[in-house]
Amino acid sequence: MKKWGKTVGTVLLAGSLLVGGTALSGVLQAPEKAYAAEDVQRNVVSVVGKGELSIKPDIVYLSIGVSTSAATAEEAQKSNGAKITKLTNLLKKTWGIADKDIQSTQFYVQPNYAYTEKDGQQVKGYNAQHTLQVSYRDLTKVGELLDAASTAGANSIGSARFAIEDPSAFEAQVIEKAMANADVKAAAIAKVAKRSLGQVVTVIQNDDGNNPVVYMESAQMSKASADMAAGTSVEAGEVKVSTQLSVMYELK
């Protein structure tokens, strides 16, 4: 009986040491992990690589509208509706613009107010506004289209935004340029720090949302230009497709 009891005591003691050893081992290893994490943080370099391409645009988004004033809201809306219908028919039938490329972006009918000391603020007629966004791809005829729209009754020409209709076609090229730019920056930093670059640790793409915009003149100025130069001239120029990569490299 004593021998059995001694044996159990020995087993219990060994178990106690085993548990204690496990706990102690955990305590000893924790600082090593912390130091390893700190080493990782100390032995990396992060840079932002930029890639950009200048490309001739292949589409323009035109803001073309009609504004009409009348004594009543009904008259203003009815008159404006007739003008916008005429304009839309011109765009579709004469210029061959598809339904999907003509979108209403603004429509309102609102009162015009006048103020006098005698009568205070009173409604002096109503104004109706209807604006279309027109997507057009023959960039050599943008000026002609605007002149035709003006002749058809458009008196509110806001802006022309030139763009690339499918920028994804150039995505691989700008990513390659951005990565090459990141490599150059990181290598320069490593050289100054008397280190060498290791493998790439992380890459994050940060698109800058670059949407090139070329603003047109006001409708009055555009019309004056047409009168003096026998037509409105619009230059497409170039637009930029760009991206940014945040890249982290290992340092050796």
Image (cartoon, grey):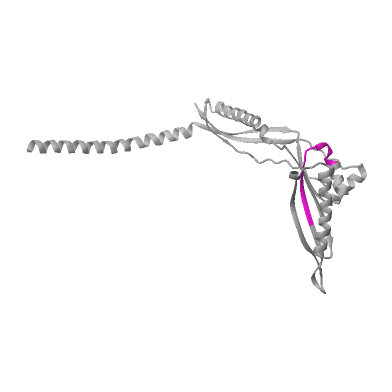
Picture coordinates of residue 199 (x, y %)? 52, 27
In magenta stretch: residue 134: yes
Q: Residue at x 64, y 33 (%)?
A: 50
The answer to which image quadrant residue 243 occupies is top right
Query: Residue 8's spot in the image, x, y percent?
Result: 14, 38
Which residue is found at the position 77% from the left and 49% from the top?
132
Q: How many marks?
A: 0
x, y percentage for residue 57? 75, 36
Q: Which quadrant does the N terminus fall into? A: top left
Q: Nearer the viewer, residue 244 or 222?
A: 222
Q: Name the foreground residue: 123 vs 251.
A: 123
Q: Residue, x 82% and y 57% (percent of image)?
A: 80
Q: Nearer the viewer, residue 236 or 168?
A: 168
Which residue is nearer to you in this view: 98 or 163?
Answer: 98
The image quarter containing residue 203 is: top right
Where are the magenta residues, as a range? 129-143
- Asked if residue 91 is positioned above or below residue 81 in the image, the reply reads above
- Looking at the image, the residue that sits furthest to the front is 93
Name above or below for residue 165 compared with residue 252: below
Q: As drawn, which residue projects farthest toward the bottom? A: 118
The percent coordinates of residue 242 (x first, y second) are 67, 35
Residue 43 visible in image: yes
Check residue 104 for magenta coloring. Answer: no
Q: Quadrant of residue 216?
A: top right
The answer to whether residue 218 shows anywhere in this view is no
Relative height, residue 178 to residue 152 (above, below): above
Drawn side of residue 173 relative to residue 247, left or right: right
